[in-house]
Image (tube, grey):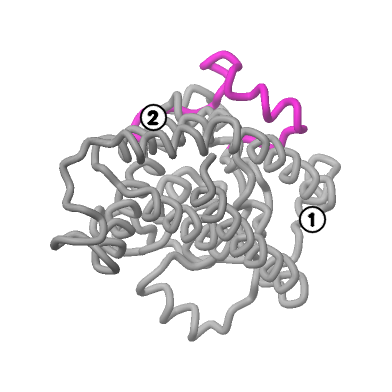
Amino acid sequence: MDATLAALLLWKGLVVGLWFAAFFAAERLRPAARPLPRRDGEPAGGWLRLLRNGLLWLINTGLSPLLVVPLTAWAATQSLDWRPDWWGGWWGGWTGLLLDLLILDLLLYWWHRANHEIAFLWRFHEVHHRDRFLDATSALRFHFGEVLLSAGARAAVIWLLGFPLVSVLVFEALLLMAAIFHHSNLRLPAGFERRLSRLVITPGIHWVHHHARRADTDSNYGTVLVAWDRLFGSLSPTPRDLAMPIGVEGRGELGPLALLLQPFRAVSSSGRSPAGESPADPGH
């Protein structure tokens, strides 16, 4: 890893880490919702949940320098050379960076949507949705299989479209900060969040995406900008209700080992099929 990449990753880690710490503390001082009553013998927002989410994050943190970062860096340095030079031409400087961020956010919208509509991808993404309560740690809760699949898809896009590594790292930092924000349990002034939701994904919008109701789970796919959901008709009309159940419809939470093994179980046990098809599980 060269010095420039190491420095960029360090700054990215510091910024995102401080952002996470701020939201983790703030949402406990000013929570929007309280943990749900006990279900399956465990409080939905208890310490076991934090440990479970933390374990998944630790696994992915270990994979990042071994596979994710090298693959991303390789794709950026070996990408197809069809774009103007990063610091010159009509696609350069700050305007080029903003255009890159816009395109990457659009592509992420479709990748997220694919994770809900393609049964194989949903097997891994379901681990994220099984969380029965939302806070900043939910933004870090992903199966390592989804992380590796996402890294492969991202590398292919970077290679094909020639995104500079700077654009990719800036977007990844923005992505993580946006995810921490819209998964957070921070209580925002109603008027402020309503105005903000016209532009970006807010906790109120993303809370509905985690509603344990299939029609709402398969909506609100945006990560940064809400415009993509409006443009492609996937914005749910359901308003957030802090009492609405969070999770996967017809499915409960699992222990750490079961979560890691869940995507590799038989197809018939996944309890879900691509959007528009009947679910395999009659109890769904």
Measuring 62% from the left and 33% from the top, which residue is drawn there?
Answer: 63
Crowding near the residue tagged with mark 1, few <14, some 14–19, many ≥20 C-alpha atoms within 10 Å = few
Q: Residue at x 16, y 52 (%)?
A: 84
Disc 1 residue type (three-letter): Pro
User: Looking at the rendering, which quadrant does residue 224 occupy?
Assistant: bottom left
In-front residue for pair 244/53: 53
Q: Quadrant of residue 74?
A: top left
Direction from residue 114 to residue 51 in the image, left or right? right
Can residue 267 be found in the magenta stretch? yes
Q: Mark 2 — residue?
A: 118
Q: Which residues are magenta?
A: 250-278
Q: Which mark is residue 267?
A: none
Q: Residue at x 67, y 59 (%)?
A: 135
105 or 195, which is in the foreground? 105
Q: Of 227 and 155, which appears nearest the observer?
A: 155
Compared to residue 159, the image places residue 27 above or below, namely below
On the rendered image, what quadrant is the C terminus found in?
top right
Percent x, y of residue 59: 69, 35
Residue, disc 1:
37
Q: Nearer the viewer, mark 1 or mark 2?
A: 2
Q: In the displayed structure, would residue 225 be above or below residue 83?
A: below
Q: Determine the secondary structure under disc 1.
A: loop
